[in-house]
Image (tube, rainbow, N blue to C red):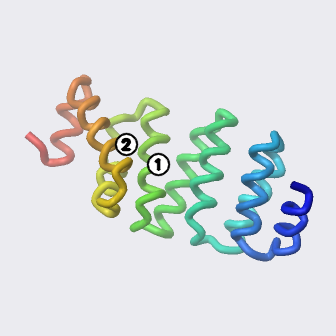
């Protein structure tokens, strides 16, 4: 493990290496170090999608889902066609109890990556759950569904 960390540190000028360090620090119980590594990765390469997802996951683990949502929204502003970011945002919104807001990013993720069975399944499950909730009529009207 120490050799792996040393190798990643040697390449710390690359977003991938910083992201890898973030993953290691997350898994070894060093959330502050992980956050610093992820933020460094985003400074180096603001278009590196895995870092947005990993940092948002770290924020979720730390009980900071609103920070994760804000981060994912920033990523989507920069990279609007990235299905992974949209899917992650949808899941974060569901966790926060905003199922009606989650449908649109989940729908877009499923449309952008039709080969991703998970995206399709989650979107369909969210639609089913929303249809049985009091928010269903409002969300369906926003999405143009009867």
Counting from the top left corner in percent of width and height, residue 53 is at: 57, 54
Pick the residue in front: 61 or 20: 20
Q: Which residue is mark 1?
A: 89
**Residue at (59%, 58%) from the top-left corner?**
52
- SS type, badge 2: helix
Q: Quadrant of the C terminus?
A: top left
Q: Residue 49: x and y, percent?
A: 56, 64
Apparent side of residue 65 relative to residue 22 in the rendered image (left or right) = left
Instruction: Give x and y (percent) for residue 48.
Output: 60, 69
Q: Does residue 117 appear to the left or right of 10 in the view shown?
A: left
Which numbered disc, 2 or 1, marks the residue that appears first in the sequence?
1
Q: Is residue 76 above or below residue 141?
A: below
Q: Which numbered tag is attached to residue 138?
A: none
- Front residue of 18/43: it is 18
Report the quarter where the N terminus lies.
bottom right
Q: Please determine whether, in this image, residue 140 is positioned above or below residue 119.
A: above
Check disc 2: other Cα within 10 Å, few if <14, some if 14-19, many if 20+.
many
| Disc 1: CA contacts within 10 A as few (<14), some (14-19) or many (>=20) | many
- The reply to whether callout 2 and callout 1 are in contact (CB within 8 Å) is yes
In the image, residue 87 sits, relative to residue 14, either above or below, namely above
Q: Which residue is mark 2?
A: 102
Q: Residue 107: image x %, image y %? A: 29, 51
């Amino acid at each position: 493990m120490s050799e792996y960390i040393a190798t990643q540190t040697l390449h710390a000028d690359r977003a991938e290496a910083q992201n890898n360090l973030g993953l290691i620090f997350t898994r070894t119980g060093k959330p502050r170090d992980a956050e610093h590594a992820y933020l460094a990765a985003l400074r180096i390469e603001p278009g590196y999608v895995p870092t947005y997802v990993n940092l948002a996951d770290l924020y979720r683990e730390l009980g900071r889902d609103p920070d994760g949502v804000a981060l994912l929204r920033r990523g989507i502003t920069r990279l609007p066609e990235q299905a992974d970011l949209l899917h992650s945002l949808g899941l974060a919104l569901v966790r926060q109890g905003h199922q009606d807001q989650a449908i649109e990013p989940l729908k877009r993720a499923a449309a952008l990556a039709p080969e991703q069975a998970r995206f399709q399944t989650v979107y369909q499950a969210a639609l089913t759950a929303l249809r049985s909730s009091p928010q269903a009529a409002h969300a369906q009207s926003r999405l143009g569904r009867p």
